[in-house]
Amino acid sequence: MLITHGTLVTFGEKNQVIPDGAILVRDGYIADLGSTAELAAKYPDEDALDAEGKLVMPGLICAHTHFYGAFARGMAIPGEPPKNFPEILQKLWWRLDKALTYEDIRYSTLVCLADAIRHGTTALIDHHASPNAIEGSLDVIAEAVEEAGVRACLCYEVSDRDGREKAKAGMKENERFIKRVKGELMGARGGLMGATFGLHASLTLSDETLEECAALAGELGAGFHIHVAEDMADVEDSLEKSGLRVVERLERLGILGPRTIAAHCVHINEREMGILREAGTKVAHNPRSNMNNAVGVAPVLEMLRRDITVGLGNDGFSNNMFTEMHAAYLVHKLARRDPQAMGADQVLRMAFQNNAAIAAMFWPSPPPFGERGRGDRGKGGRRGRLGELSVGAWADIILVDYRPPTPLTADNFPWHIIFGVDGTQVDTTIVGGRVLMKGRELLTLDEEEVCAKARELAAKVWRRI
Ligand SMILES: [Zn+2]
């Protein structure tokens, strides 16, 4: 496939804007890229997809989400509304997750994936909980992910909040799924699935469980995906349990490391940032969720200054990552009353480069390309990168219907994204060279059927709650 006549915004090491550009996609990868005139002459027999002047950019990545949360939309919470974060967990999320059946999990996932494709989000790192449907739950999600055709990294959140037995079942589910994905990696499924080891949060996990998980994940060669210091309640609980702050406690118990994602990190001090930096732990910032739960503003600028890899997640909010970027741009300015805080370039660095670095843990490079005899490797370096348009990168590409009313350059592009581009303008979504949406029409999912069935199931879930 040859994508022609697009305004290419490449990201990667050196962001470039290529007017009237073209991309050659072969075997799921970007095989060549340049001007339309050049590539059309070079590959005259290739099927063309005319971008008609749209922006062509890498698909977006979400570093932290919860597919299981989709049925919460519009749900009335019984009793008094929650007045703080622990009550939001107890009254909303821990009731919802307990009510989920396998069929609910499937449709909750499909709702999120349709939303993701619509808004150009092509790789998502999920964190799942369904205490009454644990075993095999990740397979149910994986099946939906493969149907949709996006990339997703899955895990089950281990927690002691429902007792030892459920915690054990959660560990087993992580172990089983990590082994399954390892076995299938680079297999027929086209490398869509990733896996990691899920943990809920320090405040619902005992030392004993965390030690067991650390040992198990060590054997599996996996890192963790865990909520860290999202609210002060997590810090207070950790101090009470151990005399340590959350990051300190997790470090002591072997949970941090270069393959671990710490979601939120709102209430961490300088010492804890030093520990995260030292451990190479990745952080997922979720500004919309933090604002909604009124937990505080994460010290993102301080973390970025320390070279901690801070990416961007949505924590179960809409899968429109453009909206998350807009929120990230605004919240730090307001919180500091400083218009210089958090430039658009820093926001895009989190959403693209840093999220790509996080995603690279789960979608590693496939076998050498040289066997097929094309010269791409020398030109583009290592294959299988995400979050950029370059030769050798995965062909995870979106076409965005945006006609800039002011000059657009590689330097000012981030400000165009913040002030002029939204996920609703995404027209075409491609993952691994497969077109999942074209002209805003979903090609892999029947959205009407998914939503109709989800409405029916959600009503039942609400009644059970
Ligand atoms: Zn979360």
Image (tube, rainbow, N blue to C red):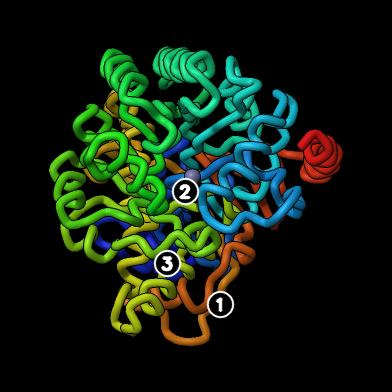
Residue that numbered label 3 is attached to: 328
Is residue 438 or residue 321 the one in the foreground?
321
How many labels sit on residues? 3
Residue drawn 51% across and 80% down?
A: 404
What amino acid is found at the position of numbered circle 2 in the picture? Cys
Q: In this rendering, which labeled residue sits more in front, label 1 or label 2?
A: 2
Which quadrant of the structure image shows residue 340?
bottom left
Q: Residues within 10 Å of mark 1 (few under 14, many from 20)?
A: few
**In the image, is 374 to the left or to the right of 38?**
left
Q: Position of residue 142 (x, y in %)?
A: 58, 26
At mark 3, the secondary structure is helix
Q: Is residue 177 visible?
A: no
Residue drawn 22% across and 52% down?
A: 308
> Does any atom of ligand 1 lie closer than 8 Å to the CB of label 3?
no
Which quadrant of the structure image shows residue 298?
bottom left
Q: In this rendering, which labeled residue sits more in front, label 3 or label 1?
A: 3
